[in-house]
Image (cartoon, grey):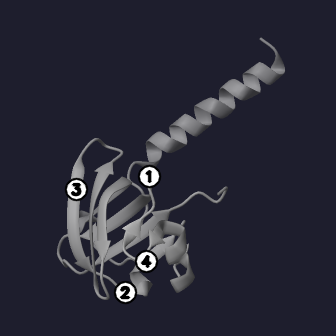
């Protein structure tokens, strides 16, 4: 086995161990919720609507479940690729107001001891 093959093998082993040790996803720093009351869903939104104060969706999660939620929202409870969401970012997730672009992904953080503690992190491609 060559030196490069050994380095690649060790690098792969280190990466797999770090992913396995990580366990749960770490929530954004400003999402305050006891970890025992927190959950997250990541996947593709298959149904979506919003008005001035509420947002509703159904998500096909990467874990093979389908989850639905109607929640109050404000701009400070929205992120886009982990960064603060601005009014101009709606055009990155919606083709028109209230109509989601196809195959839009999101990570939703929920706190089950406070139905209003929801954070939505839109996962949009930076290549488009």
Counting the numbered discs, the total is 4
Q: Nearer the viewer, residue 26 or 41?
A: 41
Do tag 2 and tag 4 residues touch (Cβ < 8 Å)? Answer: yes
Mark 1 closeness class: few <14, some 14–19, many ≥20 residues within 10 Å? few
Mark 2 — residue? 74
How many angstroms separate mark 1 from mark 4 (CA)?
18 Å
Query: Circle 4 — which element?
Result: strand
Residue under circle 1?
103
Task: Return the disc, 3 or 2, that comes first in the chain's sequence.
Answer: 3
Q: Alpha carbon of mark 1 to alpha carbon of mark 2: how far? A: 23 Å
Placement of 46 over or under 50, stated as above or below: above
Report the Cα–Cα distance between label 1 and label 3.
16 Å
Q: Residue at the front extreme?
A: 96
CA separation in Å, label 2 and label 4: 7 Å
Query: Is there any visible trace of residue 114 in the rendered image?
Result: yes
For the C terminus, the quadrant is bottom right
**Residue that label 3 marks:** 67
Element class at badge 3: strand
**Residue 44 percent location from the top left of the image:** 38, 52
- Judged left or right of residue 61, residue 3 is right
């Amino acid at each position: 086995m060559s030196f490069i093959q050994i380095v690649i093998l060790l690098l792969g082993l280190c990466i797999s161990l770090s992913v396995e040790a990580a366990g749960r996803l770490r929530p954004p720093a400003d999402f305050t919720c006891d970890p025992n009351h927190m959950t997250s869903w990541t996947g593709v939104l298959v149904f979506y609507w919003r008005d001035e104060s509420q947002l509703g969706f159904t998500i096909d999660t990467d874990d093979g479940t389908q989850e639905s939620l109607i929640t109050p929202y404000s701009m400070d409870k929205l992120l886009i690729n982990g960064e603060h969401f601005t009014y101009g970012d709606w055009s990155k997730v919606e083709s028109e107001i209230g109509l989601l672009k196809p195959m839009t992904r999101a990570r939703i953080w929920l706190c089950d001891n406070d139905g209003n503690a929801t954070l939505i992190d839109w996962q949009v491609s930076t290549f488009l």
